[in-house]
Image (tube, rainbow, N blue to C red):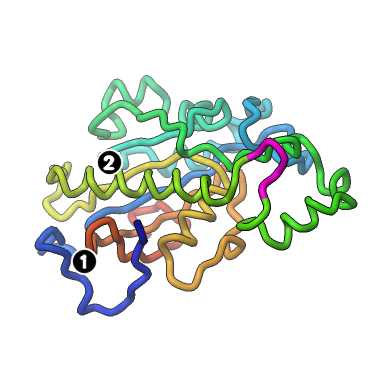
Amino acid sequence: MKYGLKEKKKEKQAHGHVNEGSQWDLELVLVRHGTTLWNRERRYLGHTDISLLAGAEQELEPLREKLQGRSFARIYCSDLMRCCQTLQIILPESELKAGRTLSAKSPIIEPCLRELHFGEWDGKTYDMLKDVALYRAWIDEPQRITPPGGESWVDFEHRLREFLDSLYEWRIAREVQPIGSVDALPSVLVVTHGGVIRQLAHMLIPGHDFWSLHPKPGDALRIQLRLAEPHKFIAEMLPYSLDNGG
């Protein structure tokens, strides 16, 4: 299923499901996990399951502070350790249980939000691979070339489309009850990986390709979504700041 990159205001309406009182139906807050050793060593890190570096709490403290008191209708997290640890730091279980994040449900651990699987190239650096012809071809055309033992770009994109499909269906199936304000915009937190954030932005935002964004560990990206045709979103990217929705 395709995702709309439409910008015209006349395309705001979508089968009567658009929130009549608001320009947008949903906000995505996409968070990249904190720093790992392989990130620091500039190694490819796909499905290999390693932890965050010591000191991750300090690195992620600014984001944790910004998320305090924010309302999330749903929370999704990649099942890999570095993302689960990041979620635990920015939204500790004690806060989730106490309701201080005002979140409706427990986090949904979602394998489809994993990074691209780099296969035999996982753990390797550019310098280790730069003379490999297949690697050079992959750098030029990642949509056509698959890393040995890794994941094709088609499969990577397909599982992210499935995630967006499920998000669309969830939003259509239920009217999220705003918490604290009639005008509150339902917000969904997604703790995931750099490549996933880049690809989701590419799929949703007009004019963005995979390399348009360079989210650093612990960065947060906000995208507002409007429901369009079946399984399509109209989207707009917002500044990184989470302060008061700005």
The residue at the point 31 percent across, 42 percent down is 70
Query: Which quadrant of the view contains residue 174?
Result: top left
Instruction: Kindly tell me whether residue 90 is visible in this rendering.
Output: no
Q: Magenta segment, which residues?
A: 146-150
Foreground of the two, 11 or 178: 11
Foreground of the two, 125 or 3: 3
Foreground of the two, 222 or 110: 110
The residue at the point 23 percent across, 64 percent down is 228
Quarter of the picture holding the N terminus? bottom left
Q: Position of residue 108 (x, y in %)?
A: 36, 30
| Residue type indicated by callout 2 | Ser
The residue at the point 68 percent across, 36 percent down is 149
Instruction: Tell me if residue 205 comes above or below residue 73 in the rendering.
Output: below
Task: Name the side, left or right, on which 228 lies relative to 78.
Answer: left
Is the residue under label 2 in contact with that under label 1 (CB below 8 Å)? Answer: no
Q: Is residue 111 magenta?
A: no
Q: Could you say whether the residue bearing mark 1 is in a helix, strand or loop?
A: loop
Instruction: Kindly tell me whether residue 207 is visible in this rendering.
Output: yes
Q: Main secondary structure of the magenta part?
A: loop
Q: For the residues carrying marks 1 and 2, which lies nearer the camera in this image?
A: 1
Q: Position of residue 106 (x, y in %)?
A: 31, 26
The residue at the point 29 percent across, 37 percent down is 74
The residue tagged 1 is 23
Q: Residues within 10 Å of mark 1 (few under 14, many from 20)?
A: few
Q: Earlier in the sequence, mark 1 or mark 2?
A: 1
Query: Which quadrant of the view contains residue 115?
Result: top right
| Residue type indicated by callout 1 | Gln
The residue tagged 2 is 71
